[in-house]
Image (cartoon, rainbow, N blue to C red):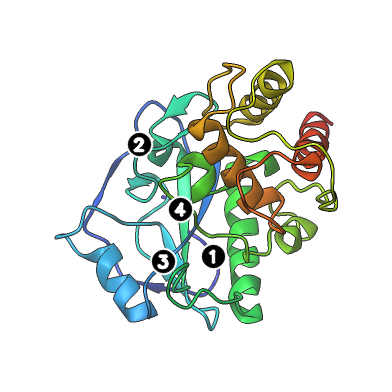
Amino acid sequence: MSVTSLPHVVVPALNFSDRVGVAGPDILLMHYTGVPTPEFAVEILTSGAREVSCHYLVRQDGGIVHMVDEDKRAWHAGKSSWEGEGDVNSRSVGIEICNPGHGDDYHDFPDAQIEAVIALSNDIVARHGIQPRHVLAHSDVAPGRKIDPGEKFPWARLASRGVGLWATPAAVADGPVLDKGASGTQVAQLQQNLAAYGYGIDVTGDYDTATATVVQAFQLHFRPQLCDGRADVSTVATLEALLAAHSA
């Protein structure tokens, strides 16, 4: 079994299963807990009555709770896909980060917590050889259904410490915008670029609700200054820069 060598406590989850069709994880998936307290989060994630679990939880004070061994499939991603493949649970390690989330008391993630997330993530990606482009948000693999860990999560800080892929977002500025109702080659190119990075999106040339949802998911992770689902100049440029970093 693969488990972190970092200091942690073990609170076993009851819900997990065998990984299916993979030799091991190649995605590291970040979540926020979306509940008021770490104690409530641990209760939810370890209870047999709820069909959910994760590999690790990181408290606000930086404490790490280990719930499911990494060689097992934790139930954290739900209905999801990446790079055209479903069952993200089978190919990922899931980290739940304590934060009440949107609509309650969504606040900045404390330094101690983020330092622990960075240490834990570096440990995981090193042991499994997880590529930077495969360090993802729950919102990336389940656009619209999930929006965590959200625009306040410090992805740039993680990337500066070797966790994840990042391109400095282009500044938000006035200019052409692709939005619902638009159609044509520019929309198709946007959809192709999103799919090339890994997002689940059909290339139709029509800027429909599904496209806006995926654009917002991209913004939540990679262009957090404005997450409105509209493909402005900043969003398009940031996506292109990310693809260039991805290919480098």
On screen, residue 105 above or below 197: below
Q: Position of residue 189 (x, y in %)?
A: 71, 21
Q: Residue at 35% across / 36% down in the picture?
A: 19
For the residues carrying marks 2 and 4, which lies nearer the camera in this image? 4
N-term-proximal mark, 3 vs 2: 2
Give the spatial CA distance, label 3 vs label 4: 11 Å
| Mark 4 neighbour density, 10 Å: few (under 14) some (14–19) many (20 or more) | many
Give the spatial CA distance, label 1 vs label 2: 22 Å
Residue lying at the far bottom in this picture: please name it: 61
Q: Position of residue 38 (x, y in %)?
A: 38, 78
Amino acid at pointer 3: Thr
| Mark 3 neighbour density, 10 Å: few (under 14) some (14–19) many (20 or more) | many
Amino acid at pointer 4: Gly
Q: Residue at 53% across / 29% down in the picture?
A: 208
N-term-proximal mark, 1 vs 2: 1
N-term-proximal mark, 3 vs 4: 3
N-term-proximal mark, 4 vs 1: 1
Residue 183, by quadrant, is top right
- Residue identifier under label 2: 19
Give the spatial CA distance, label 3 vs label 2: 23 Å
Is 78 in front, or is 184? 184
Q: Position of residue 98 (x, y in %)?
A: 46, 72
Amino acid at pointer 1: Ser
- Residue identifier under label 3: 33
In this rendering, does residue 135 appear at all?
A: no
Q: Residue at 75% across / 59% down in the picture?
A: 156
Give the spatial CA distance, label 2 vs label 4: 13 Å
Give the spatial CA distance, label 1 vs label 3: 23 Å
- Residue identifier under label 1: 5
Q: Is residue 232 left or right of residue 57?
A: right
Amino acid at pointer 2: Arg
